[in-house]
Amino acid sequence: MYSRYARRYARLVTMPIAAPHALADVTASDSTLRRFLHGLPGVDAVGLEARAASLGTRSIKTTAKAYAIDLAISMVDLTTLEGADTPGKVRALGAKAVRPDPTDRTAPATAAVCVYPDMVATAKEAVAGSTVKVASVATAFPAGRAPLAVKLADVREAVAAGADEIDMVIDRGAFLAGGYMKVYDEIVAVKEASGAARLKVIFETGELSTYDNIRRASWLGMLAGADFIKTSTGKVAVNATPANTLLMLEAVRDFRAQTGVQVGVKPAGGIRTTKDAIKFLVLVNETAGEDWLDNHWFRFGASSLLNDLLMQRQKLATGRYSGPDYVTVD
């Protein structure tokens, strides 16, 4: 249920609901797609940021905080995307994803490990027999500057190696130039190449410049078949923020209202502390609702966040912070 803050700002940031058939023909041509995307309501930046800031002030204590920490752990896509990644590092990361706290078997596993395509087989072996998924970035991550054939080969390689999920990047240059149908067709092609793997579509919101563009990209990704929409690669200066994640949560909520199709959201980059993670969980609950409070529909793209969640979890259990060697440094 909306809080008094949500009710106050809802009229400023909520998309009006259309009839279920209203989206049937919007991707029929470049002109109809452009007309639809530019017909979306403009984003009131002041209202959006005010609501995000208001929800970020919520205080969660004791039992509710313990629940939120475990929920956040279960939503982490534990990530290593460095040129210096080695099989040993990926195996260690996989072991940590399966059992984040070796001293406490009650700590939940993370949702996934996220690696480059050439490390998928190693990650798959490391998490075998667990609930942890293997996600692979693809499509010439992080810049996305490659021919479509190369991007699709990237995807197929990851899927063939056992990837459960594909994290693709959109062609931001095409999007910013108004080439919406090109971006749409590329997402559709990647979705087909992904097969049974779930597809996360990364917008790189820090490069889209405006909230209106983020709203358009969200709807474009969902129309093209994204299973998740994702803020960022974590490789630019501005990544996930409460405001841009709130905007994307509104988009998936409204998209389900119009189509009946539920799409997940993944903020990534810059979420490092338990306090940050809980703020995002409040955004999910107050905006999209409880249906998204599950790692099938909401994820954190992070590496250092898990360590802080584990430290705070131990603090709640013992009343004191652990020493510096309590968690591994990835």
Image (cartoon, rainbow, N blue to C red):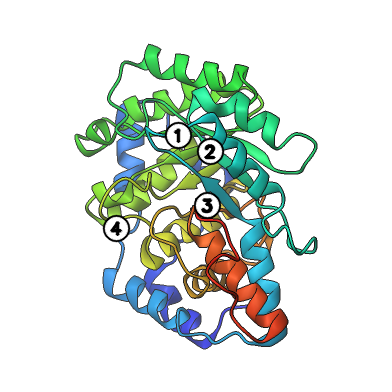
Residue at 42% across, 30% down: 27
Please tell me whether residue 18 is drawn above or below residue 288 in the rendered image.
above
According to the image, label 4 marks what residue? 211
Give the amino acid type for the residue marked by disc 4 in the picture.
Tyr
Snapshot quadrant of residue 318 = bottom right
Identify the residue shown where x is 37% and y is 48%: 234
Could you tell me the amino acid type at mark 1? Asp
Q: Nearer the viewer, residue 23 or 49?
A: 49
Q: Nearer the viewer, residue 255 or 299?
A: 299
Q: Which mark is residue 89?
A: 2
Disc 1 versus disc 3: distance between alpha carbons? 26 Å
**N-terminal label among 1 and 4:** 1
Three-letter amino acid code of the residue under disc 3: Val
The residue under label 1 is 85
Identify the residue under disc 3. Answer: 265
Q: Nearer the viewer, mark 1 or mark 4?
A: 1
Graded by Cα atoms within 10 Å as few (under 14), some (14 to 19) or many (20 or more), the crowding at tag 2 reads some
Labels 2 and 3: the sequence-earlier one: 2
Kindly identify the amino acid type of the residue bearing the numbered disc 2: Lys
